[in-house]
Amino acid sequence: MREPRIKRTKTVCTYCGVGCSFEIWTKGRKILKVEPQVEAPVNGISTCVKGKWGWDFINSEERLTKPLIRKGDKFVEATWDEALDLITGRLSELKEKHGPDSIGYIASSKCTNEENYLFQKFARAVMDTNNVDNCSRYCQSPATAGLMRTVGIGGDAGTIHDIASADLVLVIGANPAESHPVLATRIKRAHKLFGQKLIVSDLRMNELAQRADVYLHPEPATDLIWLNAVSKYIIDQGWEDKDFIKERVHGFEEYVKSLEKYTLEFAAEKTGISKEELVKVATMITEAKSVCGLWAMGVTQHLGGTETSTAISNLLLVTGNYGKPGTGAYPLRGHNNVQGACDFGTMPAWFPGYEAVQDAKVRARYEEAWGVTLPKEPGLNNHQMVEAIHDGKLKALYLFGEDMAIVDSNSNHVHDAFEKLEFFVVQDIFFTKTAQYADVVLPAAPSLEKEGTFTNTERRIQRFYQVFEPLGDCKPDWQIIQEVANRLGANWNYSHPGEIMAEAARLAPVFAGVSYERLEGWNSQLWPVAPDGEGTPLLYTEKFAFPDGKARLFPVDWTPPFEAGEEYDLHLNNGRLLEHFHEGNMTYKSKGITHKVPHPWLEVSPELAEERGIKDGALVRLTSPFGKVEVRVLVTDHVKGKELYLTMNTSEDIAAVNRLTSSYHDKITHTPNFKEMGVKMEVL
Ligand code: SF4
């Protein structure tokens, strides 16, 4: 047999929202190396450990390669015809018996724009429901809501280049050095070499916090208080950007009134941040020529996640930090395509491009194009779907590319819901924890085995190309969705993802000029994209995204965090590791990563370790009102006092953080309060 040739294929990383691209060198099914290229628009010649070493999972023996059908307590291999017949038969039956809204559809922030577009089309046009959502519900929905209220678009205001060129970067509740490593490198370089100022607010002394000019360590869930206090102090001193506010912003007077109680004294008492530090932060922000505000789950995963996100945007508006290079709001997207999954319509209230399902004119456009009558009201989000299963209203779920049994909060409650489903379809690359509850499991192809586009945190759309043939009987998710839709009466004939993108571009004005031809090779486009293909790297240069072009200052008040009760005397925080991605389904199956970091751990402060007689490596049990985990301890001064930090990426069910978290959530978006958990700890 002839020796396979060495092949070089451009791909886009699937491990975070930075959107690094690089060439993968392969021979047969063997990956020889990952080589970044200077043409890559985001990362140039950089990658992090996940982008470089996180691909062995592609040949894992644990990959799903055949459809599986549940028979009693076991799964048996099936043909595609058998599996698809079962799916379409059961979905039709349940729709007929209980109505279209008795079925929910959960999309994937790891899969492509085209797959997400097709899935929402399937839910809406074929199955007649808006019950479709994606995992942004667990992370950045509050940031999107906060930005839509104030500046009109839920995405990042500018590019990673803007962050790197800002005079001052404010990082709140985020750990970019581990969660967005290449982006963090740009900040580290600007700070070290070019005089960029850095303010970090976080419970944990992460790497950027260690390098910051000012590190704020607020009490848990109090960021809104210090943000409002800094805004108030700036306004009290007359330091606000008066011209910017007069010309470009509504609601200043009402906003000023809403800040009355947020004095420095009040903020210092509630947050534990001294008045001097707050004045220093206000002064630095005022003196900076350009400020970028970055945040992530440390802000959003709280009862008041939307309100705190709004407070960040308010502070940027008051100081005129929108619409100029090096300014703006940057919610850091965690998954590689959480931005794209939302952009392309897998949300219960939005068509692709954030046009409301309730808008009759927009609906008419889609109805004409798709040749159907569409549901008028927003559907259920992920959180509501779980509750609707418990209430007996939702009978079936179709989910692809998410391990919801691990990543949703209060996982025992979620597992109980899955047990109650009458029918459950899971489409994934591995037999996940979620798949264990399914009736049919379909084998999907990961990014290296298909083509498509991802959209990174900057709103940048990039193409990636097929490296390998799909393993076994695996198929790209878009092909599977098309086959299910056609068996249910659709007549779709997409032969390539480029045709799906062309349809989305025809229908959603923000993608008007997006095309596979324009995205060829290392090219990329940042939406909104005009019909001539011109993208928009920096938003709001002339107007904000409201009909009158003006931004809105939106008054917000503090929501105290969830209290678990006195016996739960420790505060549990959680987050990512540099080496692993999300629930770990891919990285724990990549030997290049697991030999370095094989297990999750719990960070315990030196003072707490001494008080409780705990040593490095001790096995402890954490208990919350919702469940228990067992995990080994790392004693470190990255955390203080009674604060604990559990790595969320886990290969071990017994250490999965969401066994501890609750179903309480942000009131606007229903994003769970993953970061507000009281626990007690015992040494085993
Ligand atoms: Fe991948 Fe993010 Fe690392 Fe870039 S920074 S290589 S996108 S995980």
Image (cartoon, rainbow, N blue to C red):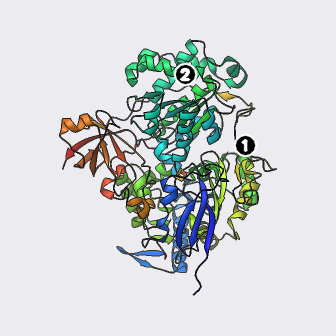
Q: Amino acid at mark 2?
A: Met
Q: Is residue 331 left or right of residue 661?
A: right
Numbered tag placed on residue 284 in the rendering: 2
Cβ of mark 2 under 8 A from ligand 1: no
- Image quadrant assignment for residue 316: top right
Q: Can residue 155 be seen here? A: no
Viewer-side residue, 102 vs 136 = 136
Give the residue at x 33% y 58%: 652
Cβ of mark 1 under 8 A from ligand 1: no
Give the residue at x 47% y 20%: 278
x then y, percent, for residue 500 = 70, 62
Please tell me whether mark 1 sits on a helix, a strand or a loop.
loop
- In the displayed structure, 366 sits above or below 81; it is above
Give the residue at x 82% y 50%: 532
Answer with mark 1 or mark 2, whichever residue precedes in sequence: 2
Question: Neighbour class for label 2 at 10 Å: few (<14), some, many (≥20)?
Answer: some
Query: Looking at the image, do the residues carrying marks 1 and 2 touch, with CB atoms under 8 Å apart?
Result: no
Question: Neighbour class for label 1 at 10 Å: few (<14), some, many (≥20)?
Answer: some
Q: Is residue 50 left or right of residue 494?
A: left
x then y, percent, for residue 498 = 71, 63
Give the residue at x 60% y 35%: 329
x then y, percent, for residue 110 = 54, 57
Q: Quadrant of the N terminus?
A: bottom right
Residue receiving disc 1: 536
Please tell me whether mark 2 sits on a helix, a strand or a loop.
helix
**Distance between the alpha carbons at the discs numbered 1 and 2:** 29 Å
